[in-house]
Image (spheres, helix red, strand yellow):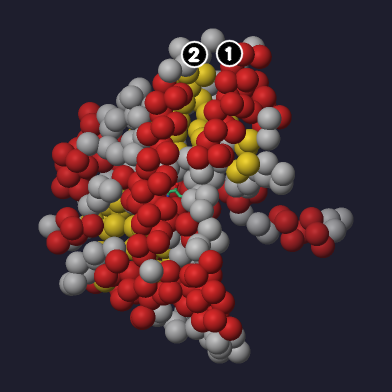
Amino acid sequence: MKSPLQKSIQKIRSVIKDIQAYHVADARGLIKLDAMENPYALSDGLKAKLQARLSEAELNRYPDPSAAVLREKLRQVMHVPQDKAIVLGNGSDELIQMLAMAVAEHDGADVCLMSFDPGFVMYRMIADFTGIDYVGVSLNEDFSLDMESTRRAIAEKQPSIIFIAYPNNPSANCFNDEDIEEIISLAPGMVVLDEAYHPFAQASFMDRLVEHDNLLVMRTVSKMGLAGLRLGLLCGHPDIIAEIDKIRLPYNINVLTQLTAELVLDNVAEIDKQAELIREQREVLLQQMAMHKDLHVFPSQANFILFRVLNRGAVDVFESIKQSGVLIKNMKADTGLLSNCLRVTVGTPDENRAFMSALMKAMKNE
Ligand code: PMP
């Protein structure tokens, strides 16, 4: 006889049971350079304004279901073309999920979601739990797009959605513009340019929304310094956005998030300055790391740096850095394009110095 618990678990789809839960490392007591967060807090002046604003929040009421004021501010700050529409998500993760749900189970047709590997893990995870085939086209060794394989995969698989992270995570590079243009023109469905790291790349497809009706541009405020808010936006043709919006749960952007984001966007110069500091610090780190002969450092247009450890095990280097009090990300690959690679987020100058000294110590240890 099966217990009620066993019977309940039996009802859960096997595809869900097979998924490895997204692991978030415990960073207590460590300098946290593992998750591409912005290391800077808001200024005291802005914090005081925020406190006053939030104390007036009507927590007994549901939020504005469409967050109209916030969407308008985002349109202005992020230069979303006037005739394009915007839908908001509880983080861009939720937008990826809404997109996948919108195409899953398409009138009995085979549905596939395509992206590039190594890439952002949530594309594959969300495809898995929405029951969509995931096609990951392998990148070239320098993390550029392999256009021959890409053309073939598009022709064979006819993907409903193609996700392109621009810059890519974990490789930190922006793909070639003409390659992306070609993918948009070959795609039989939507192409989502995921511009999560836009503040550090300063390159965008936002203004090309007017040229391509199947193009969608996704942004988030997470890397701008508001990861705790959980707010992402998807911009594109109003007819596509209207369909995606039907899937959105009515009050997905809570009152506190709406008010906070509105206030910070009114003071956007403050977070723009933070992004500038991070871009400067990225160049300092890139230069310092590149001087070590046993590190292969990949170029970065994001707020993180991918690097390969040569002549030593990356796991040992990762652990040694952690012992020194700094948490970075171990890409956990023995083979393939990410073999022996680690990824570090750019922090404050002090945090970066702590990382560099931990890294140098780790490289000496071996
Ligand atoms: N896209 C990419 C490429 C990412 O790396 C991440 C987060 N690491 C996200 C989207 C998710 O961002 P959000 O915090 O808005 O859910």
- Residues at marks 2 and 1 touching, judged by CB atoms closer than 8 Å: yes
Identify the residue at image location x=28%, y=70%. 75
53 to 269, vertically: above or below:
below
Near mark 1 (Cα within 10 A), the count class, few <14, some 14-19 or many ≥20, is some
The answer to which quarter of the image holds residue 76 is bottom left
Nearer to the camera, 138 or 218: 218
Identify the residue at image location x=36%, y=65%. 268
Disc 2 and disc 1: Cα gap in Å?
8 Å
Q: Identify the disc placed on residue 294.
A: 2
The answer to which quarter of the image holds residue 270 is bottom left
The answer to which quarter of the image holds residue 359 is top right
Q: Amino acid at mark 2?
A: Asp
- Disc 2 versus disc 1: nearer the observer: 2
In the displayed structure image, the side of residue 88 where residue 364 appears, left or right: right
In the displayed structure image, the side of residue 27 where residue 201 appears, left or right: left
Q: Earlier in the sequence, mark 2 or mark 1?
A: 2
* Residue that mark 1 sits on: 312
Is ligand 1 within 8 Å of the beta carbon of the residue shown at mark 1?
A: no
- Percent across and percent down for residue 141 are 35, 22
Residue most extreme to the front: 45
Q: Amino acid at mark 1?
A: Arg
Nearer to the camera, 239 or 24: 24
Identify the residue at image location x=62%, y=20%. 361
Tell me the SS state at disc 1.
loop
**Residue 314 seen by the camera:** no
Quadrant for the N terminus, please: bottom right
Identify the residue at image location x=55%, y=33%. 353
